[in-house]
Image: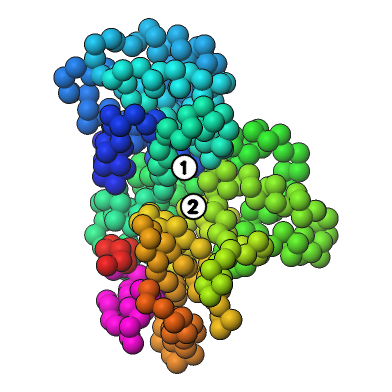
Amino acid sequence: MEIITRKHYANIVDSWIGKDNIIVLVGSRRVGKSYVLKDFIQRHSAEKDINIIYVDKEKKAFKDIDTKDDLDAWIESHFVKGKHNYILIDEVQEIKEFEKSVCNWYSENNTDVIITGSNSRILSGELATLLSGRYVEVRVHPLTYLEFLEFHDLRDSDDSLIKYLNYGGMPGLRKVGLDSEEHVWAYLNSVFNTIILKDIIERHDIRNIPFLNNLITFYADTTGKLTSANSISKYMKSQNENVSSNLILSYRRFYAEAHLIDVVRRYDIHGKRLFESNEKIYWDDLGLRNLKAGGRRDSYIEKVIENVVYKQLCFLGYEVKVGTLNAGEVDFVCTKAGKTIYVQASYIVSDKATRAREFGTLEKIRDNHSKYVISATPLLAERNENGIIHLSLRKFLKEGLK
């Protein structure tokens, strides 16, 4: 199948070539990291005086590359002196002590190294220590709405947006197609099970698998709600499941390291400080979230809209936190390059009560940072309401924030 260039990631990767940094693509399994590498090969293979060395640990041809020494031997046998060598390693965490090999080869003249990993901890151990910051991390997200339209050859419409909110942005759905809902959910179920098995159960030797599944289902049902390990422990006890807060925190960390979920902390807007408890959970992919939540779409549409707004803000490069005020809660406090914005996400703003809830809190923030309400309100494109920009969800997903 034709490889579609995801221009956002292609531009980022290309911009770091030749700058003496290892490029590390991170994200969940099946999110498209491998295709970013394959696209890189496709775009650069015709260039003169280059040599591309590619290792894919998910392919049988590379099954014998298990250790640092195996990797070194493979690269040595394919390395061409006098050319610009690109070393691409997919799912590098499957190779023992890959850090030492990567560090050795990256220091060679005219050599760039691009690696991918499905677990965020590949950057928290020896690699970070050995490189002392000589790497750049690129988070690969599921498809944005615009990418979803391109991958599935769809035009922008209400129906296309509903499909995106329902099925999410796993690139592999392009091959499955969207015509059969049964096939879509079967594919997403296989993706979910692979992540749970490979990146959580096997990696951490999990014994309490029923609770592992129950907890992730709980997080699907409570997307965008404030939760704490203590409150979850109490709830589970009410369901005759006796689990400790520490176990909940451990499992939550495992989900986050596998990029199934993001844990978003609260930020005191007036006090300018982070709170230590009661975070919100958002999912990396809407389709996986909906798979685990079950039920009808209209029963969870507000959670999905809040999640998709969060993911788009992350894709746009913002660091996102949950805002708190004495007067209420701001869905997202977003910072990028010294700039701060406030964002509320809503389904439909159609009555005074909803408007007071969504706009009222923002109106109580006495600073000059930009403020937005993003909603799926029909016939809305964009309007300014007392200095607060009310933006349609479709316009935001297509054009971002201006």
User: Is label 2 in contact with label 1 (beta carbons under 8 Å)?
Assistant: yes
Identify residue type, mark 2: Asp
Residue 214 relative to residue 71: left or right: right
Instruction: Give the residue at x 49% y 42%.
Output: 28
Q: Residue 94 at x, y = what percent? A: 54, 25
Residue bearing mark 2: 284
Q: Position of residue 32 (x, y in %)?
A: 39, 40
Callout 2 secondary element: loop
Q: Quadrant of the N terminus?
A: top left
* Up/down of 54 relative to 192, above or below: above
Label at residue 386: none
Image label count:
2
Query: In this rendering, would 78 be left or right of 191?
Result: left
What colour scheme has been applied to the protein in the rendered image? rainbow
Binning the other alpha carbons within 10 Å of mark 2 as few (below 14), some (14 to 19) or many (20 upward) gives many
For image coordinates 42% across by 11% down, the residue present is 74
Query: Residue 214, how many percent across, how many down?
Result: 69, 53
Q: Residue at x 33, y 25 (%)?
A: 112
Residue type highlighted by circle 1: Gly
Please tell me which residue lies in front, 30 or 20.
Answer: 20
Residue at 60 percent across and 41 percent down: it is 196
Q: Which residues are magenta?
A: 370-395
Per the model, the C-alpha gap separating discs 2 and 1 is 9 Å
Residue identifier under label 1? 27
